[in-house]
Image (cartoon, rainbow, N blue to C red):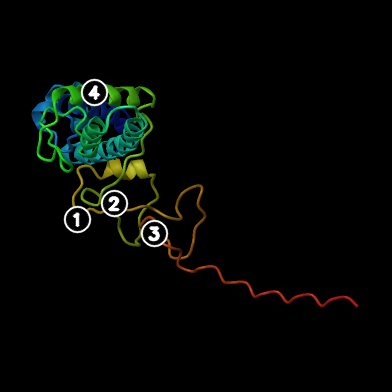
């Protein structure tokens, strides 16, 4: 995946996902194509990366945003439990926090307790949104201007050892567009200016151990004590 195009595309995806979160209450990995038309940065990135790789990048952005909001849910619970609200109000707020419906427009019902099955009133929903906005204001949101893109096996796959010329990862990703399953992604080993040649040569998948592991040193004998 071209790295420079990713730097411009990932923040645009994050902006789109934050807008969806505050409008609908949820992040959406499967954003419809009509929503991408409203973001010129996404359309320009889709023309360069392709729809498949743009979707891989969207999955990565949504996963990081979801992890961020999971931590903010813990902060929300700490604030509610440390407040002076009555037991019923705290139970309703914790129910909203459990289903992550702080900004959702859908009705939320109590799942347990004496109020089980009852819809949480709008006043409590407004209080939950107020608390979550205060929690978000105390934390810096994730930034994606230096994000390293993941290579999903659905779009890329590594090749086995072979006689492949050395290239950088970005050059391989650029040379492989559009990706096809009969053209695997090969990472050269032992051909670059910073890597000395090794036995076996050719391209190897990322993480493959060397052909000849280093021999283990014999244990040294303990020195005899001096008398």
Q: Where is residue 60, by image quadrant?
A: top left
**Viewer-closest of 52 and 94:** 94
Kindly check if marks 2 and 4 are in contact, taking CB atoms under 8 A apart as contact.
no
Mark 1 neighbour class, 10 Å CA radius: few under 14, some 14 to 19, many 20 or more: few
- Where is residue 82 shown, x and y percent of the image? 37, 31
Numbered circle sitting on residue 202: 3
Q: Horizontally, is 193 left or right of 184 in the view? A: right
Q: Horizontally, is 221 left or right of 114 in the view? A: right
Q: Earlier in the sequence, mark 4 or mark 1?
A: 4
Secondary-structure class at tag 2 = loop
Numbered circle sitting on residue 185: 2
Secondary-structure class at tag 4 = helix
Residue receiving disc 4? 127
**Viewer-closest of 76 and 153:** 76
Q: Marks 4/1: CA distance?
A: 55 Å
Secondary-structure class at tag 1 = loop
Q: Earlier in the sequence, mark 2 or mark 3?
A: 2
Q: Earlier in the sequence, mark 2 or mark 4?
A: 4
């Amino acid at each position: 995946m071209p790295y420079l195009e990713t730097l411009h595309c990932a923040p645009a995806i994050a902006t789109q996902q934050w807008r969806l979160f505050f409008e609908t209450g949820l992040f959406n990995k499967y954003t419809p194509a009509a929503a991408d038309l409203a973001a010129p940065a996404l359309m320009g990135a889709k023309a360069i990366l392709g729809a498949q790789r743009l979707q891989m990048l969207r999955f990565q952005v949504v996963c990081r945003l979801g992890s961020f909001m999971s931590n903010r849910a813990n902060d929300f619970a700490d604030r509610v439990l440390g407040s002076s609200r009555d037991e019923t109000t705290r139970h309703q707020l914790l129910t909203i926090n459990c289903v992550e419906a702080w900004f959702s427009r859908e009705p939320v019902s109590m799942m347990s307790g004496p109020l089980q099955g009852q819809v949480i009133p709008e006043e409590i929903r407004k209080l939950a949104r107020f608390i979550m906005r205060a929690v978000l204001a105390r934390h810096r949101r994730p930034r994606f201007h230096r994000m390293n893109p993941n290579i999903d096996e659905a779009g890329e796959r590594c090749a086995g050892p072979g006689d492949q010329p050395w290239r950088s990862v970005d050059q391989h990703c650029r040379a492989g567009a559009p990706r096809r399953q009969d053209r695997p992604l090969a990472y050269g080993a032992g051909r670059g200016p910073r890597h000395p040649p090794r036995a076996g040569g050719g391209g190897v998948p990322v993480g493959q151990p060397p052909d000849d592991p280093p021999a283990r040193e014999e244990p040294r004998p303990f020195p005899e004590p001096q008398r």
